Image (cartoon, rainbow, N blue to C red):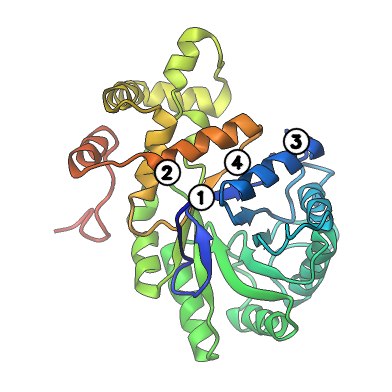
Amino acid sequence: MEYTHLGRSGLRVSRLCLGTMNFGPETDEVDAFGIMDAAHDAGINFFDTANVYGGEGKRGWTEEILGRYFAQGGGRREKTVLATKLYGNITDWPNEGKLSALNIRRALDASLSRLQTDYIDLYQFHHIDRETPWDEIWQAMETAVAQGKIIYNGSSNFAGWHIATAQAEAHKRSYTGLVSEQSIYNLLTRDIELEVIPALEANGLGLIPWSPLLGGLLAGVLRKERDGSRRNAGRSAAALDANRDAIGAYEDFADELGHDPADVGLAWLLHQPAVTAPIIGPRTREQLDASLHALDVTLDETALARLDEIFPGHKTAPEDYAW
């Protein structure tokens, strides 16, 4: 396993991040424990979760599973760079969501209790809060750092100007601010190349891509469709229909390279300079093991150029749309 710094911080994390959103709703606790142990065995030290994971009516369930995993001991918590998030409502009662100082305090303590730990390595804003001033947010986070409850802050689903504003307001307070951003990023979804990635690079933040294979559309979906092992419906079917020719060319190119499409899709992200660690979200141990193959895939400049031809990206704004 290779490791890298999370943004400009001194924190070292594995090049793959274990996403736990399926733990509970899709993967039972015993299997989740096995996946986490196997991830540690493979050298993955970076786990990501959120306080709302678990599903409607069961929000917090996933954090509870991680908490019971850590409670087994054996150095499991110490081996893990633990990332969780807040923003979404836990209940319908006022002040049970977003980024008010009150909710930050309550949500943080609740996550610590569910996770059975006394600190969170990376505490992330799951979404921008347009109604709470940054002075209030950063003051609450400074307090949490002083209390030893969190170490670093990150964001998720922020626009480029949100990141720039957050950092400017943090610097006014002589506070570190954000060290990372989680965004959807993959060969098919490259919008963040316009504004978000330039903002990350200018401010020294690491990028943690979620949905790196776009719900399986970049994991050999046409091959699976032909052999009957996958049926597409809803948004997945619509996205496939809109991109069928490109996905077909992509799967053919992966065959030329001698790799599974999923390995090529993850490897492409690992070759992007802004990327720290794509989030893999295995439902089974077999899916975890398969994801590790991407670490052994090397894409040369010719291969990267061909992937850009199949799935065109963006120039940095404003060059993308202006002279």
Mark closest to the chain's N terminus, 2 or 3:
3
Q: Is residue 227 visible?
A: yes
Name of the residue lying farthest toward the top: 227
Q: What residue type is labelled 4?
A: Gly
Pointers 2 and 4 in contact (C-beta within 8 Å)? no
What residue would you read off at disc 2?
295
Q: How many labels does the image show?
A: 4
Left or right: 305 as drawn, with respect to 33: left
Q: What residue type is labelled 2?
A: Leu
Graded by Cα atoms within 10 Å as few (under 14), some (14 to 19) or many (20 or more), the crowding at tag 1 reads many
User: Does residue 69 lie above or below 110 as drawn?
Assistant: above
In the rendered image, which quarter is residue 54 located in? top right
What residue would you read off at disc 4?
281
Query: Residue at (35%, 68%) from the top-left corner?
Result: 201
Mark closest to the chain's N terminus, 1 or 2:
1
Mark closest to the chain's N terminus, 4 or 3:
3
Q: Which amino acid does label 3 sit on?
A: Asp
Left or right: 57 as drawn, with respect to 188: right
Mark closest to the chain's N terminus, 1 or 4:
1
User: Does residue 178 lie above or below 238 as drawn?
Assistant: below
Pointers 1 and 2 in contact (C-beta within 8 Å)? yes
Mark 1 or mark 4, which is nearer to you?
A: 1
Residue 189 position within the rendered picture, expressed as x and y whole percent measured from the top left: 40, 42
User: Judging from the image, what secondary structure is the residue with disc 3 in?
Assistant: helix
